Image (cartoon, rainbow, N blue to C red):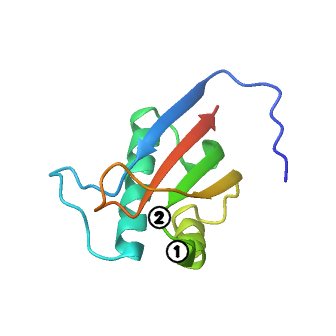
Amino acid sequence: MGLEFSQHRRLLFISGQVPETSDGSVPEGFEAQCEQAWRNVIEVLAAAGLGVTHLVKVTTFLTDISQVVPNRAVRRKMLEGHEPALTVMIAETVDSKWLLEIEAIAAE
């Protein structure tokens, strides 16, 4: 799948968002962590005056291949049908409590 955009005014590069809440706690279970990481991405977008429809590229780092299907379900729910270019990788995270990390690029 390719995504082309030829006229943009701004690009927002979102650093890896981990499943921590504002108080530093980490939810239990993969789906809860996935939702939290996406909430963090959406919060960064909102702070820049953007929304999920501005996402053009998402890279998700999962810690286990068994997380691929639940990750897809949560992503589809959180992005409300928007489908940016996507890469999913299996890798260790810096903190073993984190089951995933999401980085993204948005364009306006």
Q: Residue at x 52, y 39 (%)?
A: 50
Residues at badges 2 and 1 in contact (C-beta under 8 Å)?
A: yes
- Residue 93, percent from left and from top: 40, 53
In this picture, residue 93 sits left or right of residue 11: left
Residue 52 is situated, as x and y percent measured from the top left of the image, at 56, 50
Label ID, residue 63: 2
Q: Residues within 10 Å of mark 1 (few under 14, many from 20)?
A: some
Q: Position of residue 64 (x, y in %)?
A: 50, 70
Local SS, label 2: loop
Instruction: Report the residue at 35% width, 72% height from top.
Output: 32
The image's mark for residue 31 is none
Residue hosting label 1: 67
Q: Quadrant of residue 69?
A: bottom right
In this rendering, the label closer to the viewer, 2 or 1: 2
* Labels in figure, total: 2
Q: Seen from this angle, which residue lies furthest top?
A: 9
Does 96 sit left or right of 24 as displayed? right
Please identify the quarter of the rendering in which residue 72 is found: bottom right
Residue beneath the point at 79% across and 25% down: 7
Q: Secondary structure at mark 1?
A: helix
Residue 69 or 9: which is nearer the viewer?
Answer: 69
Q: Is residue 16 above or below residue 65?
A: above
Quarter of the picture holding the C terminus: top right
Locate residue 23, reporting x and y percent: 14, 52
Looking at the image, residue 49 sits to the left or right of residue 97; the answer is: right
Looking at the rendered structure, the kind of residue marked 1 is Gln
Residue at (34% x, 58% y) in the render:
19
Q: Amino acid at mark 2?
A: Thr
Mark 2 surroundings: few (<14), some (14-19) or many (≥20) residues within 10 A: some
Q: Is residue 56 above or below residue 39?
A: above
